[in-house]
Image (cartoon, rainbow, N blue to C red):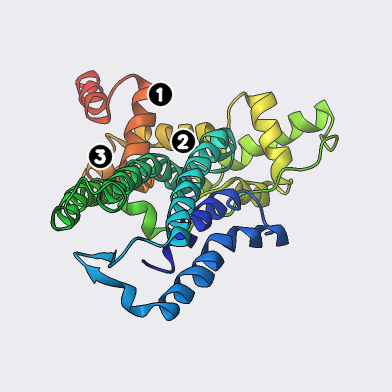
């Protein structure tokens, strides 16, 4: 047993939850209960009966029957870990709109990564729990085989996480920008002011290099325009009809199209040029470009060459 393991699922949930807030409430300390229960239960049992169990094949094996207290705690941890993992996944799905409104690139990919990883973690956890239960409680699997079975599934799990990690590698090289906090209801500017803000946004994006920053956030745009982030988001959605993610990547895509056949950028690969235009992830660039133009970057470049003769 690992004393840090009971606290991992609650910490994951708190990470997701407080990515969208700027202050952690005291009540969140209650999430430390799984860890505190482990500290209270397991060491006490070990000190009381150190000879009653042994480490064998990577598992704690009891010479006699497993203590009812430890068995109950094991099931409690299983339910707690599964619940926190599911809650984290559901919270990310619920916050998708806010993520698109706040981030242009890297942070959005962090949550996309978590959205893919959490179900894999839950599946691996369930498989491990079932195998251990069949070994310890039901006696259906021999101890010598249990570790091998779990290792097989762990290999598949690590391969999946490693593959996705390589795919999303660039996002871990970038600092995670901070999201804004929504303003209270009733603080919206009047229609004339919102249109004025929208004009300022377009002017700033047209006449600055903000979009070249792959880590650009709504807060950065707010600082450049001089307006609060909630008003920027409101103007984008109500007047321009696009969220932050869409409008920023449209500017980057148009810049890519403008530069694609210019001699000064001929030495760059398609992704090299995409990075120069502010994109920070290959998947973001390819997906957005295809949706915006209806063609892949390579197809678009080929078409432009034919048009220019």
Q: Quadrant of residue 305?
A: top left
Q: Which residue is mark 2?
A: 249
Residue 29 horizontal/vertical position (percent): 65, 62
User: Upstream in the sequence, badge 1 or badge 3?
Assistant: 3
Q: Are marks 1 and 2 in contact (CB under 8 Å)?
A: yes
Q: Quadrant of the N terminus?
A: bottom left
- Indicate which disc residue 71 carries: none
193 with respect to 275 (left or right) = right
Per the image, label 3 sits on a secondary structure element best described as helix
The CA span between labels 1 and 3 is 16 Å
Per the image, label 1 sits on a secondary structure element best described as helix
Q: Which residue is mark 1?
A: 292
Residue 217 horizontal/vertical position (percent): 56, 48
User: Upstream in the sequence, badge 1 or badge 2?
Assistant: 2
Residue 182 horizontal/vertical position (percent): 72, 43
Q: Quadrant of the C terminus?
A: top left
Q: Are marks 1 and 3 in contact (CB under 8 Å)?
A: no
Q: Which residue is mark 3?
A: 270
> Residue at (81%, 26%) from the top-left corner?
191
């Amino acid at each position: 047993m690992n004393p840090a393991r009971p606290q991992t699922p609650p910490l994951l949930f708190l990470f997701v939850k407080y990515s969208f807030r700027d202050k952690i409430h005291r009540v969140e300390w209650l999430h430390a209960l799984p860890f505190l229960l482990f500290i209270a239960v397991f060491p006490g049992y070990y000190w009381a009966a150190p000879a009653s169990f042994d480490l064998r094949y990577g598992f704690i094996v009891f010479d006699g029957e497993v203590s009812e207290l430890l068995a109950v705690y094991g099931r409690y941890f299983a339910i707690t870990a599964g619940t926190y993992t599911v809650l984290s996944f559901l919270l990310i799905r619920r916050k998708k709109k806010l993520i698109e409104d706040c981030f242009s690139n890297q942070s959005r990919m962090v949550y996309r990564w978590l959205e893919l990883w959490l179900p894999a973690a839950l599946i691996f956890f369930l498989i491990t729990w079932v195998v251990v239960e069949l070994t310890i409680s039901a006696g259906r699997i021999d101890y010598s085989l249990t570790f091998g079975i779990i290792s097989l599934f762990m290999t598949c799990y690590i391969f999946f996480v490693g593959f996705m990690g390589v795919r999303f590698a660039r996002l871990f090289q970038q600092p995670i920008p901070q999201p804004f906090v929504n303003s209270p209801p009733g603080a919206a500017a009047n229609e004339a002011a919102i249109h004025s803000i929208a004009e300022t946004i377009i002017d700033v994006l047209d006449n600055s290099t903000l979009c070249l920053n792959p880590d650009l956030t709504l807060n950065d745009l707010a600082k450049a325009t001089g307006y609060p982030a909630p008003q920027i988001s409101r103007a984008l959605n109500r007047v321009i009809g696009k969220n932050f993610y869409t409008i920023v990547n449209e500017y980057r895509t148009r810049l890519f199209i403008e530069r694609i056949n210019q001699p000064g950028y001929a030495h760059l690969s398609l992704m090299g040029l995409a990075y120069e235009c502010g994109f920070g992830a290959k998947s973001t660039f390819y997906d957005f470009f295809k949706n915006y133009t209806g063609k892949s970057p390579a197809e678009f470049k080929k078409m432009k060459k034919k048009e220019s003769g």
